[in-house]
Image (cartoon, coloured by chain):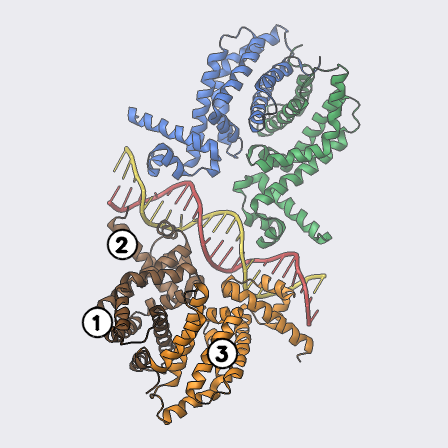
Chain colours: A blue, B green, C brown, D orange, E red, F yellow
DNA sequence: CATGAATGAGACTTCATTCAT
DNA sequence: AATGAATGAAGTCTCATTCAT
């Protein structure tokens, strides 16, 4: 029970919702506008999603899916942790810059105190990227890197990418190249020369 | 135009607003609840702050002031960049853990996408911490560290601290010590051994 | 965009609003009460009318339409200015007495000092009665009456009718017959015998 | 118990209230603005007048007193009804034009559904002008004019003057001379040549 | 007696959700 | 199944009045 038409309509709604939520945030977005943008009746929104929150969560998931699918396809040739780090930073920054809507949705997803909103991104990330977590374990085993909790490193990496891209977009004080290079350099060898 | 009594009452309101905003966020918080919590009439809120947004911005500023004043007092004995980095991380993490309300306000301010909200924290940070920015310049001059844009580093540092404290609080997967050590280690020498 | 049902509901609202505005005036009337009286949700008011002011203006227009339609149908057999004058006074006074709500709305509209409110009655009056203005011109041409600015005369007539009906209603010092006769007599030949 | 200072202050308030009520009406005027304009504290308003309504009524009375005092002094030389009529129209129109605040207060006094507001003007009028009502009786006795209810004529006269001055002020379609002449002519001999 | 800060009822309006068509 | 008109709870803000200083 999910005809082709229904799937199409669901995507239609998520696409429209992405745009509105990205621009207005969870609270600013109106169901009215989303329905209009999706070219469906307001009631239809409620047939596909329980309520506004549910639509919001699904929108985040929808965008996260798209971005991690892209990132996955760009890092899967990485040969070691070093390589992976560089490819991940490059791919993520690039994707965010090419897909401002995805980016805004991700940035805003932290805003709301909806715990599900935070969780859903992590869930999708794990779905697509957990296979790469092994690179870490291997590098630690091999003694190439310090013995870190890899989740901490990943959180740091994520958060740094997002906030630097945000700063780059709001006030173009730093170039994309500068951001990427700094990220790579810090995470590899820190500030020390 | 700001008698002692008025100052006291303003603080009273900001204290109450902090708690409510921290718990509910800008949109979830109701002026009614804030008034009740502050033990003043709803109209009084509007005598002291133009509207809800204005109260929100002032609440953020109020909390930022408190936190940077603390941090300043704990890092001002730092002798060099290395020292400063360690002291800053220690002081900031400690303050956030001891002051969950401040922390929640700051976290939310980062994500509200309210331009004033972001700006106000930066303004206060600069007010208290800009004197330390020299440590960076000196260390670069002396060749002790790589030639980085210090603003990028600071943004990374800030954002990492906030998100790790956040993770620590939501699911106690990492100890405080672990967080601090990882932060210090990564920023000093990266993941490489 | 105005189905039969919608037209009906709009009339329903205007009918209820007339009653409330007549009794309470623009400022005294509450949207809540109007909604309740119209047996619609408060939100529905805002679907049909932009805001309270807009509803007020439309209520005045609605009542003006009704009254001038009636008056028009009672004066259209008039053969000359004299006849018209008598018929107009008779019809207008009668209508106001039979429709106290219309009357109160019109009285208030004159005094609201809301420019739109005054304008709307004049607009409707012109729509229904402008064809009779010719009677004036003809009578002047024929030398039957003095050379007056007919707008001044009409303003005087209007205003006298309204205030005499008002006085009649607040303190029944004068009978309806007395009012009508005096109006007719004064406007035809003045106080002089 | 009404010292000179208190009388002065009361007048001060009424003067300021006149201006504000004339501009904003009963509902638009704020006690705050009136207090500021009167250069007294808001609380003082309540020492001199029970509440806003009471202040409003007193303001109307204050202005009515001034205007009828003026009119009285300009019509008291009238030798007969004809003379009185002309002098009254001339004086009233002139006073209204020279005192826009009084005029606006009087116009607005009908707006509110405060019955006291209407009554107070009539009370003051009677106080100053009732002595002239005899002119009417005499003229009727002498057979110079028709047998009318003089109150009806006075109401008509009042209301016509006010609305024509209003029209003159809002859109200068008719000159003052034209208004006065038409009023005099209609009330004396009607529209008939 | 004067002040103006504080109060809080109550006004308008919005918008997520429901439901008749 | 889809629509969008209707709903009404809930939100922000205003302002007449009170009252401590």
Quarter residue B16 falls in: top right
**Chain on which label 1 sits:** C
Mark 2 residue element:
helix
Q: Is residue A84 left or right of residue C114?
A: right
Q: Residue B10 location, x and y as percent? A: 66, 49
Relative horizontal placement of residue A77, taking residue D141 as reference (left or right): right
Frontmost residue, A24 versus B72: A24
* Mark 1–mark 2 distance (CA, rounded to whole Å): 34 Å
Indicate which disc residue C8 carries. 2
Determine crowd level at label 3: few under 14, some 14-19, many 20+ residues with C-alpha closer than 10 A.
many
Query: Mark 3 to mark 1: distance in Å?
Result: 38 Å
Asked if residue D53 can be seen in this view, the reply is: no
Q: Is B58 placed above or below C70 here?
A: above
Q: Which residue is mark 3?
A: D91
Q: Which residue is mark 1?
A: C78
Q: Position of residue D37 (x, y in %)?
A: 61, 64
Name, please, the residue furthest toward the bottom: D142
Residue A6 percent coordinates (x, y): 31, 27
Residue D67's tag is none
């Amino acid at each position: 029970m999910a005809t082709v038409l229904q799937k199409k309509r669901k995507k239609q709604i998520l696409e429209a919702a992405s745009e509105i939520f990205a621009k207005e945030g969870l609270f600013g977005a109106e169901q009215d506008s989303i329905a209009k943008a999706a070219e469906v009746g307001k009631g239809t929104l409620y047939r596909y999603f329980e309520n506004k929150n549910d639509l919001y969560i699904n929108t985040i998931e929808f965008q996260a899916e798209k971005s991690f699918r892209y990132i996955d396809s760009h890092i899967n040739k990485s040969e070691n942790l070093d390589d992976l780090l560089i490819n991940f930073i490059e791919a993520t920054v690039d994707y965010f810059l090419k897909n401002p809507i995805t980016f805004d949705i991700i940035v805003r997803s932290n805003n709301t105190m909806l715990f599900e909103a935070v969780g859903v991104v992590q869930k999708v990330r794990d779905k697509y990227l957990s296979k790469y977590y092994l690179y870490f374990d291997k590098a630690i085993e091999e003694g190439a890197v310090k013995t870190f909790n890899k989740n901490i490193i990943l959180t740091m990496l994520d958060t740094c990418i997002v906030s630097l891209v945000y700063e780059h977009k709001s006030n173009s004080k730093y170039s994309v190249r500068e951001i990427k290079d700094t990220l790579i350099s810090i995470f590899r060898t820190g500030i020390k020369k």
